[in-house]
Image: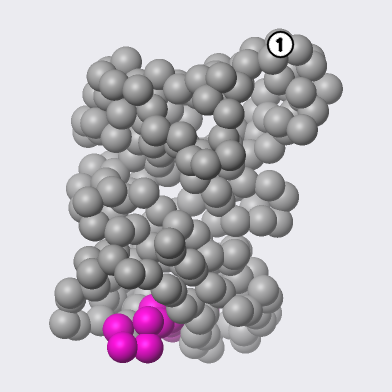
Amino acid sequence: AQKITQTQPGMFVQEKEAVTLDCTYDTSDPSYGLFWYKQPSSGEMIFLIYQGSYDQQNATEGRYSLNFQKARKSANLVISASQLGDSAMYFCAMSPMGTGNQFYFGTGTSLTVIP
Amino acid sequence: GAVVSQHPSRVICKSGTSVKIECRSLDFQATTMFWYRQFPKKSLMLMATSNEGSKATYEQGVEKDKFLINHASLTLSTLTVTSAHPEDSSFYICSAPPGLTEAFFGQGTRLTVV
């Protein structure tokens, strides 16, 4: 069974500062993918970043980076230089390899960027 | 980039009627699509895996006769909520993976059953 844990229901960050959103996971699958999605109030799910379990380097996509620590089973999202438009729900998700990207989601973190 | 289109974005229906939600991959083929349900201020829960040309695979606790899934082509999957009741009111969202390292979601459908 897969379990994704996001322990921060709500986070606040000052505009232009960096923020880290925590995610830990539990799985017995040897290969998996880790994803982060942003969900604004409109409801759409916006893909942010992907990390494969066998990737040696941490993934980066613009202002987003993933701090992947496989031994600790954590995949924290770091957003640098926060912008007001970053205010949204953020979901961590895991997909076991071979499932065609069937996701198991965490409970989400609500991020508010303060001007 | 890859686009997944979901329609309608909002629907209100009377209790006892059926509602069909469409999920289309616009610029790629998807042999597999996924349907999720999200309650207010909650996470997304996988309902079923839609497989092109074969039966859908439902997660435990999801009524397959209530939530009918048809994946008739490589670009279209439909979810039909049959004999809808107020407790079926929710946000339904589909996803389709163009590759192994990404998956894109539709815009979601907010269903209200009155």
Residue B78 vertical placement versus A45 (above, below): above
Q: Image point 62% across, 46% down: which residue? A: B38
B80 left or right of A114? Answer: left
**Amino acid under disc 1:** Thr
Regarding residue B106, the answer to whether it shows in the image is no
| Image quadrant occupied by the N terminus of chain B | top left
User: Which residue is depicted at the point 43% across and 62% down?
Assistant: A1
* A2 vs B44, nearest the viewer: A2
Residue B4 sits in which quadrant? top left
Question: Which residue: 65% across, 34% down?
Answer: B110
Quadrant in the picture for residue A114: bottom right
Q: Is residue A59 left or right of residue A21?
A: left
* Colour scheme in use: one colour
Q: Residue furthest top?
A: B17
Give above or below for B105 relative to B32.
below
> Callout 1 environment at 10 Å: few (<14), some (14 to 19), or many (20+)?
few
**If the image is split into quadrants, where does the C terminus of chain B sit?**
top right
Give the left or right position of residue B73, taking residue A89 as reference.
Answer: left
Which residue is under mark 1?
B17
Indicate whether residue A74 is drawn in magenta: yes
Q: Chain of mark 1?
A: B
Q: Is residue A94 magenta?
A: no
Measured as percent of width and height from the top left, residue B46 is found at 49, 45
Q: State the extent of the magenta-drawn residues as a range.
A: A70-82
- Which x, y percent locates residue B12? 73, 22
Percent x, y of residue A64: 38, 75
Residue B70 seen from this side: yes
What secondary structure is found at the residue carrying circle 1?
Answer: loop
